[in-house]
Image: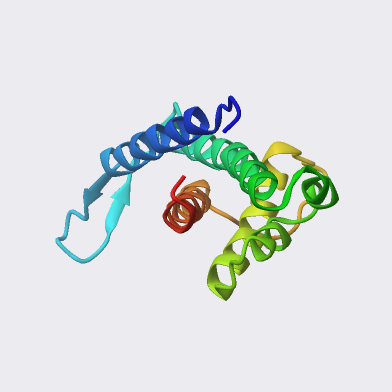
Amino acid sequence: MPVSNALIYKQISEEAYVKMVEASKAGRRPKDDGSEGFILAFDPSHASFKQSMIVVVFTGMWLEAVLHQLIVSKHGEKTFKQYDFKPYREKLTLLGVSDAVLLNDVDDFKATRKELVHEKAYFDSGEIKTAQTEAELAHRIMERISGEFGC
């Protein structure tokens, strides 16, 4: 296996995920009247949001690195070069993944990661996303792919 930062990217993503969950829990308290639900406190430092962005970005870096390594090791450099700029779905399909839920999740993840990394504030998609939900998706993808390929 070549020298790679993939494990470091994964560690950064996992550490940020834990911090995101902790920050989200710290900002909640039960409703005063005892009814179901929570009251969310305003966090001027945006700790949970920041950690969520780290999860999304570093999961993307990890996924790119791992898919590169897997495709080259199983199909060779020539095949990887043909797949280099293809969507995650096509790369995973090449590797034998057929789980529709996972393939749909990576499509959604790719769109979110792209919007985050290449922000175009003037071109609002009209869709409201929460960073924590998108980080949950990224974390779930990392767990599933790690389990599938042992990485």
Position in image of residue 118 (x %, y %): 76, 38
**Residue 73 horizontal side relative to residue 149, left or right:** right
State the image coordinates of residue 147 (x, y, percent, origin top left).
42, 55
Q: Nearer the viewer, residue 48 or 117?
A: 117
Q: Nearer the viewer, residue 108 or 151?
A: 151
| Snapshot colouring | rainbow
- Say whether residue 93 is left or right of residue 5: right
Say which residue appears at 30% left-offset and 51% top-offset: 39
Q: Residue at x 35, y 34 (%)?
A: 19
Residue at the image point whose x is 29% and y is 38% from the top: 22
Q: Nearer the viewer, residue 46 or 106?
A: 106
Q: Position of residue 49 (x, y in %)?
A: 48, 38
Which quadrant is the N terminus positioned in?
Answer: top right
- The residue under the point 56% across, 35% down is 58
Q: Quadrant of residue 66?
A: top right
Q: Is residue 123 visible?
A: no
Point out the residue furthest to the left here: 34
Residue 139 can be seen, yes or no: yes
- x and y, in percent, of residue 128 in the image: 61, 57
Q: Is residue 58 above or below residue 84?
A: above
Q: How many numbered circles are shown?
A: 0
